[in-house]
């Protein structure tokens, strides 16, 4: 227990939290405008009566509003507006903890409501959890209006744990992705490249992506990429213990996510931004980059 406490709650620079707060909140505002904007909410609402099945998380999050059964397009548009306002305040660092909490809650509400109307996805989840963690930390003690209004601090014993939590969740997500590939492909069948080759062809033709078509036409390339992706996902966990290899994994991970976008149309840009949790922007006094 003492080891865990000394690791999670060792004083750390609050500037690290401030930087990731600004970048992650800016991305979340973009997602709210583009990925989950008014049109997306109205489109999901048009399916009411045909496939609305509230997810358990939506039923929980909607309790302050009277329950999931009372949600409709008007109420969700109000949630969207409140979430956008909270995100704007979190971006500039005004009432930072409260605004981050509302941003995380509203984002989770919107995602859960949309997915309660159809196909369930999960790409937003890690970013929302990361934002919720920031709401419980001194994320507004630097680069914020809050810090201007009151005397801030350079370090805090609560500045490290949200970043360490995010690192662990990213590593677990990659291990989960590797386990899914191994489970669905009967062991190491994924490394043969056939699965990537097939889906590259299907998705590339659908999206009009020349690179994906090219990968599907070259079995050797598909196999090499399949092996590289699986090895990356399995071994990413070493970044939690070996800081010196983090930059190599971050660079490789960024390339892999760009590749999956070009070949399969799969967008996981959140992961690239979550890599910021691995970056010590400024070493505090007597603080290790670990």
Image: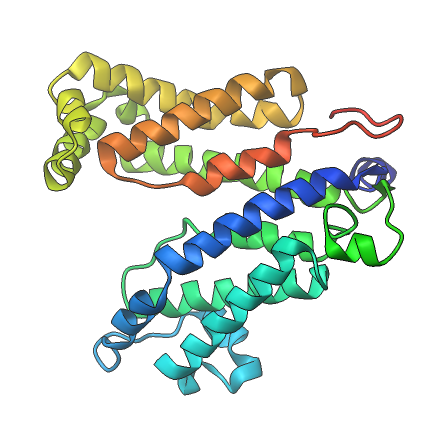
Colour scheme of the rendered structure: rainbow
For the point 83% across and 42% down, the residue is 9
For the point 52% across and 26% down, the residue is 236
Q: Which of the 4 quarters of the picture holds residue 7?
A: top right
Q: Is residue 13 in view from this perspective?
A: yes
For the point 80% across and 47% down, the residue is 158
Left or right: 69 as drawn, with respect to 215:
right
- In the rendering, at what x and y percent does residue 55 appear? 41, 70
- In the rendering, at what x and y percent does residue 57 appear? 49, 68
Q: Which of the 4 quarters of the picture holds residue 157?
A: top right
Task: Work out whether 67 lies above or below 39.
Answer: below
Task: Give whichever of 82, 57 is nearer the camera.
Answer: 82
- In the rendering, at what x and y percent does residue 214 appear? 14, 21
Task: Work out whether 86 lies above or below 17.
Answer: below
Task: Work out whether 271 lies above or below 93.
Answer: above
Q: Is residue 235 in view from this perspective?
A: no
Which quarter of the rendering shows the C terminus?
Answer: top right
- In the rendering, at what x and y percent does residue 131 appear? 60, 53
Total residue callouts = 0
Which quarter of the rendering shows the N terminus?
Answer: top right
Task: Give whichever of 131, 232 is nearer the camera.
Answer: 131
Left or right: 93 as drawn, with respect to 13:
left
For the point 28% across and 14% down, the residue is 224
Left or right: 8 as drawn, with respect to 196:
right
Left or right: 19 as drawn, with respect to 269:
right
């Amino acid at each position: 227990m003492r080891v865990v406490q000394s690791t999670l709650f060792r004083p750390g620079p609050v500037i690290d939290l401030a930087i990731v707060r600004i970048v992650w909140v800016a991305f979340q505002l973009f997602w709210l405008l583009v990925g989950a904007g008014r049109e997306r909410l109205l489109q999901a609402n048009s399916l009411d009566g045909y496939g609305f099945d509230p997810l358990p998380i939506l039923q929980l999050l909607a309790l302050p509003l009277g329950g999931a059964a009372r949600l409709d397009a008007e109420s969700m548009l109000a949630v969207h507006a409140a979430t956008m306002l909270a995100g704007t305040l979190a971006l500039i660092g005004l009432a930072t903890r409260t605004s981050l909490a509302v941003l995380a809650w509203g984002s989770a509400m919107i995602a859960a409501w949309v997915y309660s109307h159809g196909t369930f996805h999960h790409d937003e989840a890690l970013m929302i959890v990361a934002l919720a963690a920031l709401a419980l930390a001194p994320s507004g003690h630097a680069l914020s209006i809050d810090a201007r209004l009151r005397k801030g601090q350079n370090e805090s014993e609560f500045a490290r744990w949200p970043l360490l939590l995010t690192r662990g969740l990213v590593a677990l997500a990659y291990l989960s992705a590797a386990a899914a590939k191994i489970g669905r492909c009967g062991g190491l069948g994924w490394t043969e490249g056939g699965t990537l080759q097939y889906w590259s062809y299907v998705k590339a033709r659908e999206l009009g992506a020349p690179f994906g078509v090219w990968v599907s036409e070259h079995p050797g390339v598909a196999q090499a990429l399949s092996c590289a992706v699986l090895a990356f996902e399995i071994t990413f966990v070493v970044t939690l213990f070996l800081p010196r290899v983090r930059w190599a994994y971050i660079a490789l991970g960024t390339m892999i996510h760009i590749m999956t976008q070009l070949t399969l149309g799969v967008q996981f840009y959140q992961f690239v931004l979550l890599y910021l949790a691995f970056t010590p922007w400024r070493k505090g006094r007597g603080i290790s980059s670990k």
